[in-house]
Image (cartoon, rainbow, N blue to C red):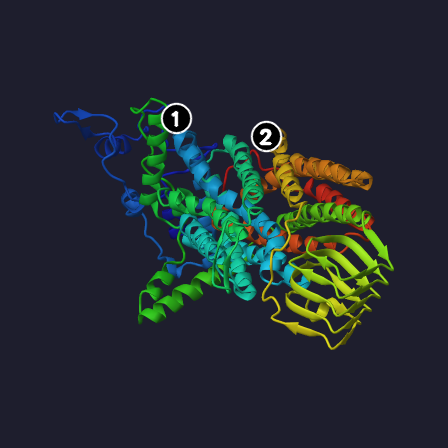
Amino acid sequence: QGGREANQVSDDYRYQDGNYEGYAPNDGYYRGGDDPAHEEDAQSDVTEGHDEDDEVYEGEYQGIPHPDDIKEKQKKRAPAVADEYRDRADLMAERMEDEEQLAHQYENIIEECGHGRFQWTLFFVLGLALMADGVEVFVVGFVLPSAEKDMCLSSSNKGMLGLIVYLGMMVGAVVLGGLADKLGRKKCLIISLAINAAFAFLSSFVQGYGFFLFCRLISGLGIGGSLPIVFAYFSEFLSREKRGEHLSWLCMFWMIGGIFASAMAWSIIPHYGWGFSMGTKYHFHSWRVFVLVCSLPCIASLVALKFMPESPRFLLEIGKHDEAWMILKQVHDTNMRAKGEPERVFTVSYIKTPKQIDEFIEIQSSTGTWYQRWLVRITTTFKQVWDNVLYCLTAQYRMNTLMLAVVWFTMALSYYGLIVWFPDMIRYLQEEAYESRVKIFDEEEVSHFTFNFTLENQIHRNGEYRNDKFIGMKFKEVRFEDSLFEECYFEDVTSSETFFENCTIISTVFYNTDLYEHKFINCRLINSTFLKGKEGCHLDFEEDNDFLIYLVSFLGSLSVLPGNIISALLMDKIGRIKMIGGSMLISAVCCFFLFFGNSESAMIGWQCLFCGASIAAWNALDVITVELYPTDKRATAFGILNGLCKFGAILGNSIFASFVGITKVVPILLASSALVGGGLLALRLPETREQVLM
């Protein structure tokens, strides 16, 4: 009881009727409290300064009073009980009370600091990191058509390359998001961006499929970890009135990343000559230049982040009062100078810090040999991260976490599934139109003729070719069925989707061609010779419809602009819950119109409509996830939910792609039902627009 009384009287900032004693009015000038002793301390420590003529003036801060110094006199009035003799539940209860008081005081401090140049600078720095995440989602899809020929990829390898980035993002979001609550927002964001930049840069140079796959996996791990940190980091510099709107504006950089990737792919990849070769083994083609360019936003954000401070809210959470005060003063002074009011004084002298209950960890990690200390730090840190993960499932947060998990998962399953399904359906419609124009030749007889031109989209049945030469030519989508080749000569021939079925080939020579064994299906080869076959895979043909795929992605990214603007302007007016529910239900309605998408232009139009309608739900999900969890669990919870989102993306990509060319009913019904279920469940979440960040 004596300990509780001591702690009660030692608290300088008692929260009464929604305000803190000792906190100055927000008019830009310092006023002392009613306590004469406190006013005397304030005059000596806070408001007394000297100018060049040694004149005393008001408003210059001369030192940072530490909480222990401020409470020292009060502690002498009652006997204190050492923390090691107190029950852990009491310590946790005291910490919870401290955190509640800190949350309201911090909101007042951020309001005094204002919203200005500092927040806008941080906005663009973190926006580049979010832009890098948007770029990463599109990179593999754009390079896949070129990379599959450059690295001889099979269908299974192509599928793995498409999913490996999401797998890395899923792991990175959980691990690095959890570490951000223990090591700091800035430090973990720098680690995430450095990992992404290094391995994205390296992946543009590696030649083997296995190493390229590994680089994209680690690159995805890095960029996946940046997403939860970016939103947690930026939200802790925003006041309650600005948080929803400006976090929504920040989401626009994901759209900018998609536009950037589409534009760069369109302008770089088709230029096959933009590269170089070193011998016959090393080739640096244009798609590798594109991968290199796509790492630039991440590198730019990494460099700019070095000049930004750590989150003061995080520093206060771990008891670093002085550092947090200095950063908040920097925010205040930067904004006041930008507004033309440099004389405005930062009036805060003391900020509440929560009770620290893990001091023994620092003592333990400072003893023993260096590897023992590192082992203790690493194991302790990951234990704390795991405890944070479990904390999100405690009674206080269990229902919110489970409902958010379902909403994140259903949104990701539908959105990412359809985002892959749209381009695949467009390719399928193009292939159907291409196949409808096929030319069929029956029972043709050709002898003593030289083919030195391209044969494309043709079927030759029951033909006879005697003493013919095929020199310096290309086959594209050509099939020979039940045909005879006798004493023919093939030299310097390249082919794409070309096959010989049930053919008889007699006394024929193949020299420097890519007509490999698998292209002869049930054929009889009699006295035929294969000499010096082409090595490796070759980009033999420019795809005429590649530009359309880039255009589809470009328009899909651009179409979210109206949704971004609307969500940013209305986020704080109609609330997060109505925004999520309304956006998901409207997106579900858009899915039903896909039944009428029987042409390329119709599919592009419905894709744009769906993306524009769904972006508001994504923005509101980001905002409410940040606001529902306390500071020491915020990035962890966001990382868990975002990792689940990437798992939904993997499932969506796999499921929806398997129905291309088979049926549209299953993907459309699956997407719309998931959106309806998630949207209705989202309406049961608590509204957070009026609450402060805990």
Residue 136 in the image: above or below residue 218 = above
Question: Residue 249 or 627: which is nearer the viewer?
Answer: 249
Could you say where residue 206 lies in the image, as x and y percent from the top left?
49, 61
In the picture provided, is 289 more to the left or to the right than 559? left
Question: Residue 487 or 412: which is nearer the viewer?
Answer: 487
Could you say where residue 72 lies in the image, as x and y percent from the top left?
28, 46
SS for callout 1: loop
Residue 285 in the image: above or below residue 340 = below
Q: Mark 2 points at which residue?
A: 565
Q: Name the residue under label 1.
A: 26
| Residue 112 in sight here | yes
In the picture provided, is 163 more to the left or to the right than 450? left
Disc 2/disc 1 C-alpha distance (Å): 31 Å
Query: In terms of image quadrants, where is residue 25?
Result: top left
Q: Residue at x 45, y 37 (%)?
A: 124
Question: Which three-letter amino acid code belongs to the residue tagged 2?
Answer: Ile
Question: Residue 391 or 489: which is nearer the viewer?
Answer: 489
Question: Which three-letter amino acid code belongs to the residue tagged 1?
Answer: Asn
As drawn, the label of residue 101 is none
Within 10 Å of disc 1 (Cα), the crowding (few <14, some 14-19, many 20+) is some
Marks 2, 1: nearer the viewer:
2
First in sequence, mark 2 or 1: give its number: 1
Tag count in the figure? Answer: 2
